[in-house]
Each structure stands twice: as structure tokens, then as C-alpha cells.
Image (tube, rainbow, N blue to C red):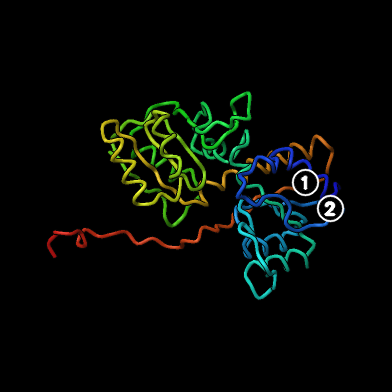
Amino acid sequence: MPRLSEVIAALENLWPAERAESWDAVGTVVGDPDQEVARVLFAVDPVQEIVDEAVKLGADLLVTHHPLYLRGTTTVAASTFKGRVVHTLIRNDIALHVAHTNADTADPGVSDALAGALDLRVVRPLVPDPADPEGRRGLGRVCELDHPLPLREFAARAAERLPATAQGIRVAGDPEQVVRTVAVSGGSGDSLFDQVRAAGVDAFLTADLRHHPASEFLAGTAHSPLALLDAAHWATEWPWCELAAAQLDEISDRHGWDLRVHVSKTVTDPWTAHAASTTTNTPGAPN
């Protein structure tokens, strides 16, 4: 069995910490470099439910996409939510490693996994990494469909292929609009509207779209209709867990490590239910 330091070195080779955004908090949060690792669990969120799953699984290492302490802390007291996570990890000899924005821009990375889940062909990064001479790394991806689809059918595909959440897929645009090219970005994506408009795609699929940025973006593309598809944040990033697990499996085989790699299927999207609006609540509709 490899030591934690060996596994972390392999993960850092996939997602170097220096490629994370300056505001990000990536890398190893908890763990003894000399401990042996036999079982690894991948998940999106380092929440207590996932940590308890890691304990039940007998995992030695938990790898998550989202950081535990993104903005720092002054306490790890078990009376706090995050402190309890740390205590549970240490008590059960489970290491925690985070790959966030360094996994977003990797090749392959979070948006590649999202594109793969939707059967899209990746053409190029949406926001290329200027430090990558090959032009393959970067934030988001510009993709093509094998066959053009009406927006309603592409939205249905996204709802079917991405993990189920209470939100589902919100859509802005003409349902019959033909979609041939799509920009995708796992996680929050409304900061990328300028790059999406410049990419000349037919649709943009991402998460956490807010009212004002989305409204202004749509108004700015009124003469060249561009559809928006808004999925749950967790759902757009979960496919990366399967990609990352497969990458570690390949490394394990190459090194002759006896690693058992798992992907959590626990839904950690915070929203648990959805109540559809009714026509009787439409302003001006008869009561």
C-alpha cells in the first residue's frame, strides 16, 4: 500500500496547487504523510454526511472538490460544523485533500467531465490558461453536439444525464431554438458571460445563475439569441468525481498500488424539494 505522501504527490501532479486561484484553499487539510492508504473516497463537498460515509467505508483518504476552510478559521472546536468534520477525520485516521480551481482548469478537468456527461465534444477551453502552451487547460469548455437539437431536447438531455436534484434544469430561451454549440462550466458561471458571448455559441450550461446578470446577458444577446441552462451547482461538478477516481485508478495500476477507489453517490445539494408555480398565481390571470 502507498503512503499518503505518495498518493498526494500523484494528485498534485494531476492538479498542481500553484494552478489554483489566489483566493482558493486547496491541498491537504488533514492527514499524516506516513500513513498508509488502501481506500479512497471522492466527493464534491467535505460535509459531515460525506465524512460519515468515509468512516463507514473504511476510507483512509477523502478527496473533495470544495474546500473545507475557504476563508480560514480561528477554531476547529468540535462544537462547530467544520470543527466536527476535522475531529471525525482525525479520530478515524482519514486524510482530507482538496482540488478546487486547480481541478476546474485542469486537462482534463471539471468542465471536461461535465461535457462528457452530456455527450458533448470538447473543442477548446472557454477561458484558456495563458501559461499552457498547448492551449488545452483553462476555465470552462466550448463544445459541439454530434447532431443539432432543439433547446428543449438538449435541456431534457441535461436533466436526464446529470445527477437528479430538486432544482433540475432551468432554461432561458426559445424551446425550439436549434442548439449546435454549447459552452459549459461546472459550478458558478455567470462571471463568464463576456467570454460566452465572445465564443459565439448557441447555449451556455452552468450553475448558480443570478437574476440580474442573467437578465442583462440575455438583453445583450437579443439579436443573436443565446440560451441559458442553469443546473444545480453540485450536479455540474459531481461528474468530475468519477473522472478523478478513474485517473487515480489508472495511476494506482501503473504504480502497482493496491488502492480501492470509490465515488460517493450521496447528494449534498442543499435544496431538497421543488414546488412548481401554478398558472393561477400568474399576474393578471383570473382567480
Q: In this view, does 169 lie to the left or right of 113?
A: left
Looking at the rendered image, the quarter that the C terminus falls into is bottom left
Q: How crowded is mark 1: few (under 14 residues within 10 Å), some or many (20 or more)?
A: some
Which amino acid is tagged 2?
Answer: Pro
Residue 67, percent across and down? 63, 55
- Furthest-left residue in this view: 286
| Residues at discs 2 and 1 in contact (Cβ within 8 Å) | yes
Residue at the spot 31% in from the left edge and 41% down from the top edge: 218
Q: Name the residue under label 2.
A: 33
Please, what secondary structure does the residue beneath circle 1 have? helix
**Residue 133 vertical position relative to residue 100 in the rendered view, above or below:** above
Disc nearer the start of the sequence (2/1): 1
Residue 257 coordinates in the image, percent (x, y)? 83, 42
Q: How far across and down, in percent of the image, does residue 131 sit?
A: 63, 30
In the image: residue 285, left or right of residue 33: left
Q: Say which residue appears at 61% left-offset and 59% top-offset.
A: 71
Q: Which residue is disc 1 drawn over?
A: 8
Label 2 and label 1: CA atoms lie apart by 9 Å
